[in-house]
Amino acid sequence: MHETALVKNLIHKLQRVCVEEKAERVVEVSVWLGALCHMSPDHFTEHFLQEASGTCAEHARLRIEASDDIDDPNAQDVLLQSLELETNDEALP
């Protein structure tokens, strides 16, 4: 399923960033949904919650921008726009 693969790819990216940045967890994720990615914001959220379960992104807030531009070169993609991490340093008093 194309939708599941897109979300799994995003979760893998988030996990790599957490490891690289020595982060405890992902606090917030902002994504852009291309007009031809076959997912509404609700559908994306459903897939994200399922795939993020048990990962550093499990409780992340989602901010989703959905495009309606079918001519955009990324119209079939889900793009990570930004993310907020909680690092080990922030967890210390």
Image (tube, rainbow, N blue to C red):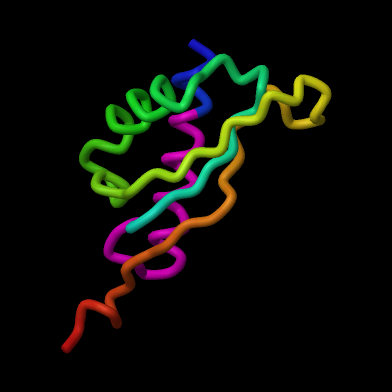
Is residue 15 shown left or right of residue 36? left
Quadrant of the snapshot with the C terminus: bottom left
Closer to us: 41 or 29 = 41
Residue extending farthest to the left is 93
Q: Is residue 83 magenta?
A: no
> Which segment did they paint magenta?
7-26
Is residue 59 shown left or right of residue 47? left
Q: Position of residue 43 (x, y in %)?
A: 41, 20
Q: Position of residue 4 (x, y in %)?
A: 44, 20
Q: Is residue 23 magenta?
A: yes
Residue 38 drawn above or below residue 60: above
What residue do we see at 80% from left, 29% from top? Answer: 72
What secondary structure is the stretch in magenta mostly built from? helix
Question: How many labels were placed on the picture?
Answer: 0
Closer to us: 82 or 55 = 82
What residue do we see at 49% from left, 48% from top? Answer: 30
Q: Quadrant of residue 34?
A: top right
Q: Position of residue 92 (x, y in %)?
A: 19, 84
